[in-house]
């Protein structure tokens, strides 16, 4: 059966069953993931309610419900579910992938560095028939061009490759690239349907900052959302 929980942990990696990860790193977005089979095999899973999902210092309130991703039953199975490297040739990206963390009050943490991509594992893993969400910095303290700096300029059709811990490669082609205003466009409904919700096919959604910069708060006012489909 489904168990509702409120996430409460950030700064350290979160156990998949007790407090699964969600979106973050590049967007202040409340998220909704799809239900997936629980390890126990009873058809249920851990359902999480995330209070707030910030990115790069910007916070936007909103409840998020996620269901537990399937647990790997052995080391080989686990390796097949864990992405470790992203390559985007036309954006100059060849970066390691890390698992994001969340705060004690349910706020999703940014990627830990300027040239690392955060993968929010509670939503999905590559190879599953749904939406995989990752995020990266546009720029960073002392780094004017971070890992996703060139990503917003990529046209539809450009390729993104994700490599798994077991060596499997997943290739995706960009199908849309949109800039959303955080204050006026990233409503909970838009986030659920256009950003982190179930796609019904193997998709990859990448999020980074964009638009105008509020220099006083050192926060970007918009978010780029790049959606790609598996090829």
Image (cartoon, rainbow, N blue to C red):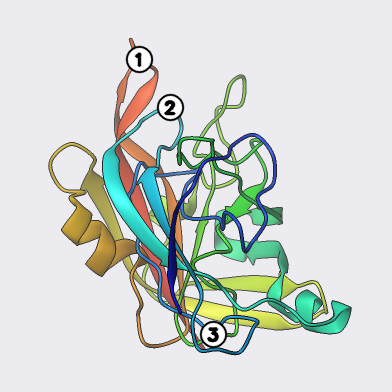
Q: Residue at x 17, y 60 (%)?
A: 189
Q: How many marks?
A: 3
> Residue 143: x percent and y percent?
61, 26
In terms of sequence position, does the residue under pointer 1 or pointer 3 come before the other? 3
Label 1 secondary element: loop
Q: Which mark is residue 119?
A: none
The residue beneath circle 1 is 217
Mark 1: few, some, or many residues within 10 Å (few <14, many ≥20)? Answer: few
175 relative to 47 in the view: left or right: left
Q: Are marks 1 and 2 in contact (CB under 8 Å)?
A: yes
In the depicted structure, whether residue 82 falls above or below residue 102: below
Q: Are marks 2 and 3 in contact (CB under 8 Å)?
A: no
Residue at mark 2 to residue at mark 3: CA–CA distance: 34 Å
Q: Which mark is residue 57?
A: 2
Q: Quick one: 80 or 214, which is closer to the camera? A: 80
Residue at mark 1 to residue at mark 2: CA–CA distance: 8 Å
Mark 2: few, some, or many residues within 10 Å (few <14, many ≥20)? Answer: some
Q: Residue at x 64, y 83 (%)?
A: 40
In terms of sequence position, does the residue under pointer 1 or pointer 2 come before the other? 2
> Residue 43: x percent and y percent?
50, 89
Mark 3: few, some, or many residues within 10 Å (few <14, many ≥20)? Answer: some
The residue beneath circle 3 is 37
In the image as oriented, which residue stretches furthest toward the top? 216
Q: In the rendered image, which quarter is residue 89 located in?
A: bottom right
Q: Residue at x 74, y 74 (%)?
A: 164
Label 2 secondary element: loop
Q: Residue at x 83, y 79 (%)?
A: 166
> Residue 60: x percent and y percent?
29, 37
83 relative to 203 in the view: left or right: right
In terms of sequence position, does the residue under pointer 2 or pointer 3 come before the other? 3
């Amino acid at each position: 059966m489904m168990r509702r929980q409120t996430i409460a942990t950030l700064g350290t990696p979160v156990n998949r069953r007790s407090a699964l990860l969600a979106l973050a790193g590049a967007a202040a977005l409340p998220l909704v993931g799809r239900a997936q089979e629980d390890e126990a095999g009873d058809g249920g899973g851990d359902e999480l309610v995330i209070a707030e999902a910030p990115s790069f210092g910007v916070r936007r309130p909103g409840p998020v419900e996620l269901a537990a991703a399937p647990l790997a039953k052995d080391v080989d199975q686990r390796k097949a579910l864990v992405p470790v490297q992203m390559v985007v040739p036309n954006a100059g990206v060849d970066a390691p992938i890390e698992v994001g963390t969340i705060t004690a009050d349910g706020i999703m943490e940014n990627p830990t560095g300027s040239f690392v991509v955060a993968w929010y594992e509670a939503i999905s893993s590559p190879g599953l028939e749904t939406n995989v969400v990752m995020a990266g910095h546009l720029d960073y303290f002392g780094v004017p061009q971070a890992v996703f700096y060139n990503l917003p300029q990529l046209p539809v059709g450009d390729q993104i490759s994700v490599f798994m811990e077991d060596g499997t490669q997943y290739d995706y082609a960009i199908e849309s690239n949109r800039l959303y205003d955080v204050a006026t466009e990233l409503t909970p409904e838009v986030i659920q349907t256009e950003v982190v919700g179930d796609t019904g096919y193997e998709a990859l959604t990448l999020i980074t900052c964009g638009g105008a910069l509020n220099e006083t708060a050192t926060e970007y006012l918009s978010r780029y959302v790049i959606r790609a489909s598996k090829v």
